[in-house]
Amino acid sequence: MKKCRGIMVQGTSSDAGKSFIATALCRIFSDMGYAVCPFKSQNMSNNSCVTLDGLEMGRAQGVQAEAARVEPQAYMNPILLKPRKDTSSEIVLMGKVYEAPCDKNYYRLFTMDKGLETVREALSLIDDRYDVMVCEGAGSPAEVNLNAAEIVNMRVANEADIPVLLVADVDRGGALASVVGTLELLGADRRRVKGIVFNKFRGDISLFEDAVSFTEEKTGVKVVGVMPWLADVVIEGEDILSLNWQRGNQERAGEEKLRIGVVKFPRVSNHTDIEAFRFEPDVEITELSSPAQLARLDAVLLPGTKSTVLDMKYLIDSGLADAIRRFYKEGGAVYGLCGGYQMLGEKIDDRYLRDNEKIPEIEGLGLLPAVTLFDDEKTTVRSSGRAAHPCFKEYTPVEGYQIHFGRTRALRGGEGFSPLFELDGKKEGLADADLRVAGSYLHNAFHNDLFRTTWLNLLRKRRGLPERAAVSTAEAKEAAYDALAASAKENLDVDYIIKIMGLPAAQPGSASRRGEAG
C-alpha cells in the first residue's frame, strides 16, 4: 500500500515557475506537520550542493528541502546532468559520478534502462520515509521529440501515480495558448493534469478573470489559482544570475552602495554562492562581461565554472584578464570561488585533459602564488571550520561544501599570503595580507554571516563608508519561505490540492515517520 501522497508540478515551458511553486508547497505541507520530500528525477544544471554523506545533488532540490525543513538527500534528485560542452554532460547518479558521459546516446542507451531504474529506486525510498512528496518536472511535458524516452515529466507522474499541476508564466505573454497547446499534445497523459496555475501575474487580477473562465471552459481543467509577481520574495535561482536580482539591488535608492561585479562566465556554475549578497541593503551586484565595467566597482567575484581552462581563455580573449590584474593593482578587491580560485593562480595544468579537450595548460591571473593540476579525482564533501586569515580578528565559524576536480597547491616563497580557512583541521584557500585577493574551494562561504560581513566591512572601510552589523541570511531565508507560502495559500486553492492528492483529513503522520525523513 502506498504510504506517501504526492503532487507533481509541471510547466508549459522552462522558467515558468515550477521550482517556485514546488518550494511554496514544500513549506505549506511542512507547516501542516507532514514529513515532506522534494523530488526531481532528473535535473540539468551546474548548480549543485553536497549532502551530509558527501553526495552531490541539484541545488534547487536542496533549497526545497530547506523549505520543507528536512535534510537534503541525493535521492531527492537521483539524476543530475552537469553540462560540460554543448553536446555532452557529466552524469551524477544518486550523488556519484557515473562512468558514462551524457552524449548523443544518452536517451537511446541510458534513460529507459539505468535511468528509469534509478528513478524507481528513489521513489521507493521516498515512499518508505515521507508523508508527502512534492515532485517537480523539467521543461515542458509536451516535448514530443523526447517523450518516448523521457523520465522527468509524465512518466514520473505515472510511476508515482500522482496528480499534476500545470504552471504557465503569464508575464511572458501567450500563457493561454501555451496551456491549451500543452494539454492538446499530452494525449492520454492529459488525465493526470488536475489543476492549472498561472504564475507571475502583475496588475489588476480582475482583468484576468475572463482568461481563467476561458481556460476552464476550453480545457475542462480547474484553474487552481493565479500567483502574483513576487519581486520582494528572494528564493535562490537555479540556472543564471537573475536580472530581477540586479534590478532589486539597483532599486535600493538613497544610500551609497558597494558595487560588486560577478564575472559572467559562459560555463558558470554554482552562482548561488553569490545569493547571500541579495540580503545586504547597501550591496549592488552586477554581471561583469566587459573591461569597461570595472571602473565603477569595489570588488570582482570570479564564480565557479564547469571548465576552468576554457573560461580562463574567455577571460584572456575578452580582455577581462588584463583588466582584472589592473583593477587589483589599483586597489580593487578580487575573490575567486572554486574555479575562480583556480584562475587566480599562476598556472592551470590540465595535462590529462580532464577539464577540457584541447588545452593542456593555460596561464592564470597570477594574483595568487599557486598552481592547479587537474586529475581524475573529484572532491564532494561538506566542510566546516573557521576563517584563519589574520584579518578576521574574532572567531569566525564557517561551513559549506566543496565540489571540484583539480588540486591547488601554494608555491613556496609566497610571502605575505596566508590560508583563508581552516576546514576540518586542514588549511584551505589563500589570500594576501589585507584580503584584497582571496580564493577558496568552499562553496557557500558568503552564506556565513560573520565571514561575509567582515569581508564587506573591509570594502566599506576602503570606501570610507561606515561598517554594518551582520544580516542573518538564515532568518531572511526563513522569512522568504514563509512569505512565499503565505502568498500561495492566499492565491491558490490549497484545499483542492490536498483533495486531489488524497491526503487524509486528519492531522498527519506520526512522529516516527517524521523522524525517519532524511
Image (tube, grey):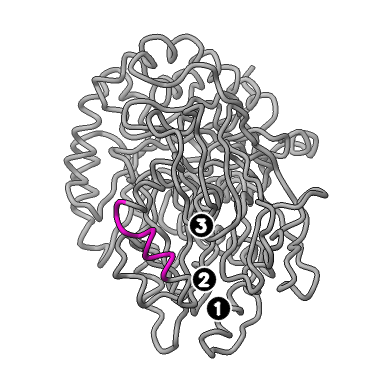
Residue 435 x %, y %: 62, 70
Q: Quadrant of residue 74 in the image?
A: top right
**N-term-proximal mark, 2 vs 3:** 2
Quick one: quadrant of the C terminus?
A: top right
Towards the viewer: 51 or 167:
51
| Residue 23 sits inside the magenta stretch | no
Instruction: Determine whether, in the image, residue 22 is placed left or right of residue 128.
Output: left
In the rendered view, would you say 256 is above or below 359?
Answer: below
Residue 482 x %, y %: 56, 60
In the rendered view, would you say 24 is above or below 216?
Answer: below
Dot 3 corresponds to which residue?
366
Tag 2: residue type?
Answer: Ala
Residue 232 x %, y %: 43, 68
Towards the viewer: 55 or 34:
55
Mark 2 and mark 1 residues within 8 Å of each other at the beta carbon: yes
Tag 2 secondary structure: strand
Tag 1 secondary structure: helix
Q: Quadrant of residue 502 in the image?
A: top right
Identity of the residue drawn at 46% across and 45% down: 305
Quick one: quadrant of the N terminus?
A: top right
Instruction: Determine whether, in the image, residue 426 is placed left or right of residue 207.
Output: right
Dot 1 corresponds to which residue?
459
Q: Quick one: label 2, few (<14), some, or many (20+) residues within 10 Å?
A: many
Dot 2 corresponds to which residue?
333
Tag 1: residue type?
Answer: Leu
Towards the viewer: 400 or 336:
336
Please identify the dominant SS of the magenta region: helix
Marks 2 and 3: which is nearer the front?
3
Residue 99 x %, y %: 54, 17
Marks 2 and 1: which is nearer the front?
2
